[in-house]
Amino acid sequence: MSSIKALEAHALRRTCDFGDLAFRTTDELPPFEGVLGQPRAMEALRFALEMRRPGFNMFVLGSPGTGRHAIALRALQSQAAQEQPRDDWAYVYNFTTPHRPVALRFPAGQAHDFRRDMERFIESLGAALPALFQSEEYRTRRRLLEDEYRERQERAFTELQEEAQRRSLTVLRTPTGFVVAPTANGEVMQPDVFRRMPESVRKQFEADIREVQNRLQQVVQAAPDWESEFREKVRALNHEMAEATVSRLIAPLRERWSELEPVRAHLDAVKKDLIESADEFLPREPQNPIEAAAQALAPPGAPTRGLRRYGVNVIVSHDLGDGAPVVTEDLPIQPNLVGRVEHVQEMGALVTDFMLIKAGALHRANGGYLMLDALKLLQQPFAWEALKRALRRRIIAIESAAQMMSLVSTVSLEPEPIPLDVKVALVGDRELYYLLSRFDTEFNDLFKVAVDLDDEMERTPESVADYARLIATIARRDNLRPLQRQAAARVLEESSRLAADQDKLSVRMTRMADLLREADWFAAGAGASEIEATHVDQAVAARERRFGRIRDKAQEAILREMHFIDTDGAKVGQINGLAVWEFGAASFGRPTRITARVRMGSGEVIDIERRVDLGGPLHSKGVLILSAFLGAHYAADRPLSLSASLVFEQSYGGVDGDSASCAELYALLSALSGLPLRQDLAVTGSVNQHGDVQPIGGVNEKIEGFFDVCRARGLTGRQGVLIPAANVRNLMLRPDVVEAAAAGRFHIYPVRHVHEGIELLTGRPAGERQPDGSWPEGTVNRLASDRLAAFAEERRRFGSLARAAETGESQ
Amino acid sequence: MSAAPRGKRVLLALHPSDELEAALEHAAALASELQSELAALFLEDQALFDLCELAAQEVSRGTGALRPLEAAALERHFRATAQAARSRLEQVATEQRISWSFEVRRGRLGEAVSAAAQEATLVVACRSAFGAGVGRQARTAGPVAVLLEGGPGEAATLDAAAKTARRTGARLIGLSTRPRPAQEAAALIEQAARAGAALELRAADDGDSRGVALALAEIAPRLLAIDARGTAAQSGLAPHLVAAAGSDAILVSSD
């Protein structure tokens, strides 16, 4: 009989008693500051935050629910609070290359001051310049110019007309020009009168007409030059008049901003432009219907389009007491990262200018910290590339996706790029981190620091105490009822169960915080002022119920014997394996029947699941390993003349993992030896080529899955589960399972080697190999070995007959 | 007093020129004020067609280039300009809510305007309609001038000029062909004031046509008002005075 002892009940679940930590409810515990159970990650975070070198951005990787975002954000905010805010930035008009707005840098808090200064300056100009151009001096000087120009024209035409009159000619206007005509008595000569004149007179007229025409041509051709000259003189007058006023008004600004060279240069450009285009301050009639419509549609008080170019578009501003910026962007589309140039509809066309440049998250975070969700970032077209390009070039260049793809040819702006100094924290799953690390060649250079958050922490007296304080902190933060000592203990035990380890605590605090909220809900329903242990148990049970529809359906199928699972008796070549099913947030164990059949063959173990593409590679590996075990164990010196088949009965989905390889081996040994296996036991564990039983995952769910079936049918006191001995530390079984074990109604057997397991399952000793290589009589190994020997002999005999037959035929 | 009884016509004499638009606006404003019909007369200068028969050459206003003056081209241009003027008149008249008519007539310019003046209460004529002002820029600034000859139509002419000055915000300068006694001058000033304008009264140094022309040239008005029944208009001097003034003109009938 087997020597394996079932585990004591206390080994099935590690309870929590808080040791020396004295408190009745969590209200008595001090709050927990900091991050629980993440020393490695916090060290990496500190390193990344303090390392101000390019590329030392961080990727905060960890499982969902570990508080990745909160931990990273808190660390960024804490660091930022110790730093000074960086620069303000504004875009202004580029007077030499209008489509490339100029970026101006200001010390924190000063960009808006500059904007206000410019607004007041333009407002002053708006009053001063029109007054200047309406002054008597200006009007007089302008009229003089106009008179001079008009008189010049008139003089030329008058002289021409006088010259014509001296020759009895006159100059007439036609719709498109002028014509020189002969006159008689001051009137244009009639054609017949002209024709009747002597030829010599006519010829003299014609000569005179040609001469006057020539002079007329000279006058007409000179007219544009006169007009240009006139306009140039008016421009010079405007320039002269405006310069004094503009210089006087802009001088205080230049003085105030003298220490910022780019700002001073901009003010000089503003001054030059204002002097050259001062007449834009004059009220003027629209020059065409489009201008008229635009004026009519413009909001009252809006600056004219021309005056907008003296505006200041502050895209980033800080207050001195703010600390460095910490920016998160929940919708990290490309324009939200690098900024964008917006357009407005104007008279049916989309137009833009530097005042429509909008900042992106990189602008706002410049000089500080930017936190982004990696998955969201990667889901947005062009966003990841835009972020990398900005970090690589260390500038923020506003480029639209359409521009990048050359999809539009509309003239737009190319704002001057802004130098970038930002620390980026990406937050995401481990898988994402490893994928990027492997497939994106730039990733490792740009995100040099991995902040790897653990899913669990050691369960020590110190960590348990911290955990209790953290529970207290969450309860206070969320306005929950205080937890009684036993309730807090239940929460900790649930944490260990979530970690699937008696010596660990889960740090997936989102789940634990939810548990506290749910327990509080039950406490409220019970009218309790404190959360009790039963409320925590109710919350755990309720959650299992909520997610348990499929589990219950699966169990119902077993209980109604639609899905065949025996929980008593013994059968040859049949065993209860255990599988874990996962559906979203829910996972549960479920027994599944595994059967094996053997016959003479050539050493092949057929994995039926694999043959029909329902078995995964890990399952196939397990089957190959057990095949190797069989061959080495029983047929080291002769051919393994066996053909075996293994199947998960009534399994219509995929099977993967090697946690059933132990059960499959037991089924094969049973089929070989002819010894029936106990059906009141279920088995989980993988096996290596030496027959050692190796640990598997999901041990608690698997045990509970078989327990639930057995309990539903009635616990016999013989039922139980064989688990790898190495998995004992993972046991955090439900209290009802522990209670059944304590009462001797259900058993958990830790198994180290398949010999131990087969003894328990068959009731026969496995048998130790004797010095002559044989196995003791009546043992499982002997029976299996004999069967294999028989197969080998049969095979040899068939081989001889076949050869004889072939020889006979050849004769 | 009212310069034009209800039902009378304001006649607008037009000829293709830069001043066409300004003359049109003056006329429309006056017609609206007088609640009169606005009758536009688009004049095609017969002299130009006569010159076509003499193989005359035209100097382009834009480039100074020479090209033959052809009747067909002239007609085409006149027609296009007339059409544009008609459309503009329709637009302005609709805005001002005045009735209007439009006629194209071919003739000698000065004569045609003078003849038209006999048919209307008031004639607004762009100066090119008098055959004057060749090559000059349209003047859009300056005072409104009124030629005060002391005839029976003087009051109506002053009234029309004063209203135009008030409407355009221009100064009103009255140029008398003779010195006026103080009482007479005061009456003129008071009349202008009633029409909403402050009259600056001047007297020509020399009352003949040359002196008046010199005085008008010095004033450089944007618009010159002349009594259609006065000596200047009746003796055929109006075109010369308009040319000297360098402005558009209104001929005001006292009927």
Image (cartoon, coloured by chain):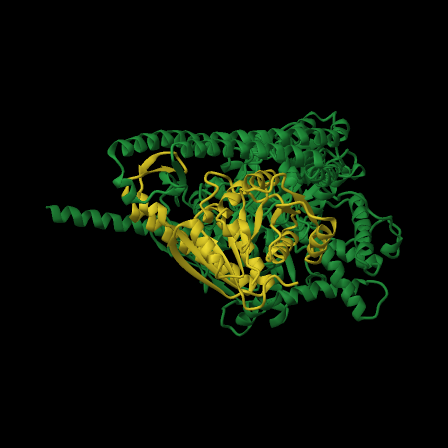
Chain colours: A green, B yellow
Image coordinates of residue A434 in percent, x first then y, are 55, 40
Image coordinates of residue A371 in percent, x first then y, are 66, 42
Front residue of this view, candidates A337 and A590: A337
Tell me the quarter of the image containing the N terminus of chain B: bottom right
Using the rendered image of the protein, determine whether residue A3 is visible from the camera's viewpoint: no
Image coordinates of residue A561 in percent, x first then y, are 51, 73
The answer to whether A512 appears left or right of A551 in the picture is right
Q: Residue furthest left?
A: A811
Front residue of this view, candidates A371 and B46: B46
Q: Is residue A765 above or below residue A415?
A: below
Image coordinates of residue B243 in percent, x first then y, are 51, 42
Tell me the quarter of the image containing the C terminus of chain B: bottom right
Q: In the rendered picture of this protein, how many numbered marks are placed on residues?
A: 0
Q: In the picture, residue A133 is in which quadrant?
A: top right
Q: In the picture, residue A211 is in which quadrant?
A: top left
Q: Residue furthest bottom?
A: A560
Front residue of this view, candidates A90 and A59: A90
Q: Is residue A341 above or below residue A84?
A: below
Using the rendered image of the protein, determine whether residue A336 is visible from the camera's viewpoint: yes
